[in-house]
């Protein structure tokens, strides 16, 4: 009885959802999150609390994947010197990560699933949304199809830095931390509504 009482708010939420009484604030939670989120490339020199790291971990492990094959693997890097090396993975678009207190490397085993690229992209997206909901900033750093130099891919470079077995392909890195500053979200009027079609392309 005691446990039921303690969980009553959760039970009430799901009852209200079932009978259609979820209020506008609950309905709009995801939209409000998307309205606020912007890529962050400058971070405060502030360590991320362990409970927030644990929150990010649970969110990424709940990422949905095709046939629940879960081809992805996640490497959380919080050692500053290692992060500085990861920031050298490609000539452009990664150097800002050197000041992030946390970098999450997302890789996958292509042999596990034919849509591993899509699965890792979904997982990376969830990391960004989880970071935003936890009051953190983040930025996507594309690795697959990028070069470290003329002789080595960015993924090969990262694999060497982190001792990743050769069967895994590095898809992305995500720099995470407390933002130094944050731009406001894009106004609704700026959204490309012309890209929405009804029933047929151009409809």
Image: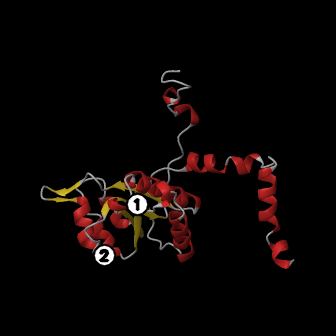
Label 2 crowding class (10 Å Cα cut-off): few <14, some 14-19, many 20+? few
The residue that label 1 is drawn on is 174
Most extreme residue toward the top is 203
Q: Nearer the viewer, mark 1 or mark 2?
A: 1
The residue that label 2 is drawn on is 81
Label 1 crowding class (10 Å Cα cut-off): few <14, some 14-19, many 20+? many
**Residue 45 percent location from the top left of the image:** 44, 70
Q: Is residue 95 above or below residue 185?
A: below
Residue at image location 41% in from the left, 68% down from the top: 74
Residue 89 visible somewhere in the drawing: no
Most extreme residue toward the right is 1
**Residue 170 percent location from the top left of the image:** 31, 61
Disc 1 versus disc 2: distance between alpha carbons? Answer: 17 Å
* Image-quadrant location for residue 159: bottom left
Q: Is residue 82 above or below residue 34?
A: below
Does residue 158 appear left or right of residue 54 in this picture?
left
* Image-quadrant location for residue 55: bottom right
Q: Which mark is residue 53?
A: none
Disc 1 element: strand
**Residue 179 percent location from the top left of the image:** 48, 60
Residue at image location 66% in from the left, 51% down from the top: 29
Q: Nearer the viewer, residue 66 or 101?
A: 66
Q: Nearer the viewer, residue 18 or 86?
A: 18
Disc 2 element: helix
Most extreme residue toward the left is 151
């Amino acid at each position: 009885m005691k446990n039921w009482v303690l969980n009553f708010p959760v039970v009430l939420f799901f009852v209200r959802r079932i009978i259609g009484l979820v209020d506008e604030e609950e309905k709009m939670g995801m939209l409000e999150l998307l309205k606020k989120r912007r890529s962050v490339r400058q971070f405060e020199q502030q360590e991320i609390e362990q409970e927030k790291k644990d929150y990010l971990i649970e969110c990424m492990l709940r990422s949905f994947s095709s046939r629940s094959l879960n081809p992805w693997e996640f490497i959380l890097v919080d050692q500053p010197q290692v992060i500085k090396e990861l920031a050298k993975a490609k000539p452009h678009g990664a150097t800002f990560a050197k000041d992030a207190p946390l970098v999450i490397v997302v890789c996958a085993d292509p042999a596990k699933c034919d849509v591993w690229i899509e699965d890792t992209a979904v997982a990376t997206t969830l990391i960004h949304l989880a970071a935003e909901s936890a009051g953190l900033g983040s930025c996507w750093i594309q690795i697959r199809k990028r070069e470290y130099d003329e002789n080595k891919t960015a993924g090969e470079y990262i694999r060497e830095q982190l001792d990743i077995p050769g069967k895994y392909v590095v898809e992305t890195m995500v720099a995470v931390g407390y933002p130094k500053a944050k731009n406001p979200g894009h106004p609704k009027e700026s959204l490309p509504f012309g890209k929405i079609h009804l029933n047929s392309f151009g409809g």
